[in-house]
Image (cartoon, rainbow, N blue to C red):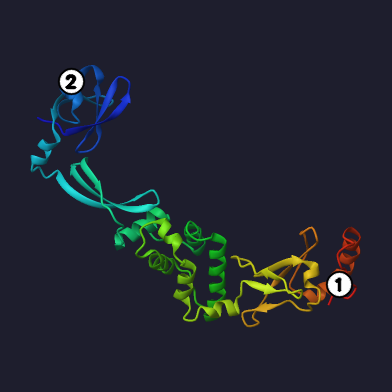
């Protein structure tokens, strides 16, 4: 009985070489039995005899030339074309196989923009689970590989606040997977995704007029001293702004967004940028807390203005 054809894969130990068998698994061969020059020059072998102990040991080989395998019409012979992930991009490999042995392999030139390619990019490149079960936090982390993660989270929170008026659950697993597939459609590499304006594409999936988002839920706020400060949006927190306490002088009430529905949380900072107060009630802060803050900080930072009437 003839044993499966083997392929010389690599040297695994100084005294042995390893054969990969076409029907799966490996067999070892002692180097002292691999002394025939014709065997040493060959890559493929017919295994005539094996000994099975704690491992499979090949005892007798006949060297084969690759073209002999191609002439064989055995059902183990096949030609396949596979989409695989390699170095941040999807590539297409065309392989000639004999069972599990790869006789020849060619990488096809040009990107493959098929659905299979997009799926490979999504699963292998971005790391999306094949079963598709994920929440919005995982979704943001995964797309954070190709989009600034903080900006992406801010956008998703703003969309959640904007759409929450409809009292619908936006972030079901099926919806998130469908959105991800739309965003990667036609792409074959992480570089290609990074070159796209994915943030705008996400907005367009939710809004017919994307300008409404910036109008109702802006990303910056103009302080009384005409300085702009960033509005922070993060999951599980109310939107907030932070700046030096002096930047809020003259402001009597906490600013609101989303057409007056959401009050911003204010982080009032000392000149050393450390928080003095976090509040949503600015009038109460000016009246009850500011006098004591003024006494303490005016001594430490006399060059900064500390008016008695901050409003």
Q: Residue at x 89, y 58 (%)?
A: 300
Label 1 to label 2: alpha-carbon separation: 95 Å
In this figure, which residue is indicated by the disc labeled 1?
A: 288
Quadrant location of residue 215? bottom right
Residue 136, above or below 19: below
Task: Name the element at disc 1.
Answer: helix
The residue singled out by tag 2 in the image is 37
Q: Position of residue 107 (x, y in %)?
A: 27, 48
- Judged from the image, the secondary structure of the residue bearing numbered disc 2 is helix
**Residue at (53%, 64%) from the top-left corner?**
152
Give neighbour class at mark 1: few <14, some 14-19, many 20+ (Cα, 10 Å).
Answer: few
Estimate the x, y position of residue 292 in percent, counting from the top left: 89, 66
Q: Nearer the viewer, residue 194 or 20?
A: 194
Q: Is residue 37 left or right of residue 190?
A: left
Residue at 8% from the left image edge and 40% from the top image edge:
71
- Is the residue 304 above or below the residue 67 in the image? below
Residue 138 seen in the current view: yes
| Rendered residue at 53%/69% (across/down) | 156
């Amino acid at each position: 009985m003839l044993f499966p054809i083997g392929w010389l894969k690599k040297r695994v130990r100084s005294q042995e070489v390893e054969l990969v068998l076409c029907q799966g698994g490996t067999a070892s061969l002692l180097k002292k039995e691999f002394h025939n020059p014709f065997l040493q020059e060959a890559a493929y072998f017919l295994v005539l005899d094996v000994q099975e102990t704690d491992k499979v040991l090949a005892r007798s080989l006949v060297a084969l030339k690759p073209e002999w395998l191609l002439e064989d019409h055995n059902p183990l012979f096949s030609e396949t074309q596979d989409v695989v992930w390699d170095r941040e991009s999807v590539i297409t490999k065309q392989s000639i196989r004999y069972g599990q042995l790869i006789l020849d392999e060619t990488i096809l030139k040009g990107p493959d923009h098929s659905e299979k390619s997009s799926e490979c990019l999504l699963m292998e490149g971005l790391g999306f689970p094949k079963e598709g079960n994920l929440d919005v936090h995982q979704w943001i982390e995964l797309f954070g590989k190709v989009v600034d993660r903080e900006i992406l989270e801010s956008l998703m929170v703003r969309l959640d606040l904007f759409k929450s008026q409809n009292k619908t659950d936006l972030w079901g697993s099926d919806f998130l997977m469908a959105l991800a597939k739309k965003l990667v459609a036609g792409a074959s590499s992480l570089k290609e995704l990074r070159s796209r304006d994915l943030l705008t594409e996400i907005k367009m999936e939710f809004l017919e007029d994307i300008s409404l988002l910036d109008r109702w839920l802006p990303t910056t706020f103009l302080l009384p001293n005409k300085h702009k400060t960033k509005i922070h949006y993060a999951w599980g927190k109310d939107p907030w702004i932070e700046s030096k306490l002096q930047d809020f002088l003259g402001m009597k009430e906490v600013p609101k967004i989303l057409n007056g529905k959401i009050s911003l949380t204010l982080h009032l900072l000392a000149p050393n940028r450390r928080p003095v107060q976090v509040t949503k009630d600015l009038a109460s802060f000016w009246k009850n807390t500011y006098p004591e803050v003024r006494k303490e900080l005016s001594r430490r930072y006399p060059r900064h203005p500390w008016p008695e009437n901050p409003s």
